[in-house]
Each structure stands twice: as structure tokens, then as C-alpha cells.
Image: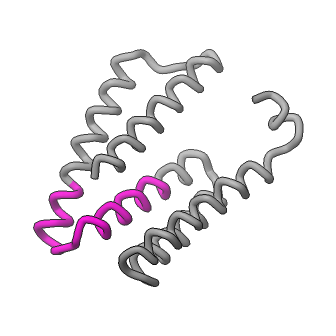
Amino acid sequence: MFAVLAVYLGTVLFYAVKARRAGNGPRWWKVLALAVGGLVGIVLADLVGYREFDMDGDARSAVLLTLGLVVLAWLDRSVLVLVVAAAFVFCAVVLAQGQLALLLSSLVVLAGAFAALLSRPKAAAGQT
């Protein structure tokens, strides 16, 4: 659960800094409101998954991360992120349980990161 919260905060900060460098960054209070509101939403969604659906902690974290990836894919209009989200939930929840699920879902995310890096144009890759 704490990893999900940390990933969310890191993503919010990354996009806030990226927007600020581009010159159209949001005000600090909007970033703070988005961060706090998202953290409360994640905790409530985790509680609902535990109470109402009787899901174990690994499945709840996988579902929350998948929902986050789907929202990120929608915001970035990225088909690659959507495919990685679908493959992640398939490997983490549907296909396997335990350590094998952790290994397969981690490999899916790693492969998605490599695909994102390799699909960037050379001009964009040289800027960073």
C-alpha cells in the first residue's frame, strides 16, 4: 500500500515539475490539493477493496496501480501505457498468484518502460 502511495506522489511531483519547466505549471496549492485528494482516494479505494470485495493486499495494490496506469494513459493519450496496464493486471491478478505474479507483472512494467524509451524519437532522446 505504501508503495502505491509513493508512486502516486512521485507521479504528481514529476508532472508538476515537468509542467513548471514548460512554463505552464499549476500553482502550488493545486498540486498540494491533487496530491492530498489522490492519497485520500487511494486509501478509500483500498479500504473498499478490503471491506466490500474481500481482496487480499497484493490484489488490491495491483488493481489500484492498474487504475492509476489507465488514468495516466488517458491523460497522456498513450496506447502503450494502456497496453502495459492491461498486461500488468492480467499477469498480477488473473494469470498467477504469489511470487510468480510479482515477477511477471514486474517484467511487464520493465518491458513497457523499455518500449517507451525505444519508441521515442532520437531528437527527444537527445534532449534529456
Q: Horizontally, is 114 left or right of 15 in the view?
A: right
User: Where's residue 90, x and y in %?
Assistant: 48, 77
| Residue under the point 31% across and 41% down | 38
- The answer to which quarter of the image holds residue 79 is bottom right
Image location of residue 76, percent across then percent down? 60, 46
Q: Is residue 50 magenta?
A: yes
Main SS class of the magenta portion in the image: helix
Point out residue 6 in the picture as x, y percentages from the top left corner. Answer: 37, 41
Quadrant where the C terminus is found in the figure: top right
In the picture as drawn, the residue positioned furthest to the right comes out as 122
Q: Residue at x 39, y 36 (%)?
A: 9
Magenta-tinted stretch: 45-70
Residue at 27 percent across and 36 percent down: it is: 37
Q: Based on the displayed image, in which of its 4 quarters is residue 63 positioned? A: bottom left
Q: Is residue 65 magenta?
A: yes
- In the rendered structure, the answer to whether residue 35 lies left or right of residue 70 reads left
Looking at the image, which residue sits at the far bottom?
95
Q: Residue furthest front?
A: 99
Q: What residue lies at 27% left-to-right and 40% top-to-bottom?
A: 39
**Among the 4 quarters of the image, the one containing residue 59:** bottom left
Question: Where 16 sits versus 8, above or below?
Answer: above
Q: Nearer the viewer, residue 128 or 68?
A: 128
Residue 119, compared with residue 90, is above or below; it is: above
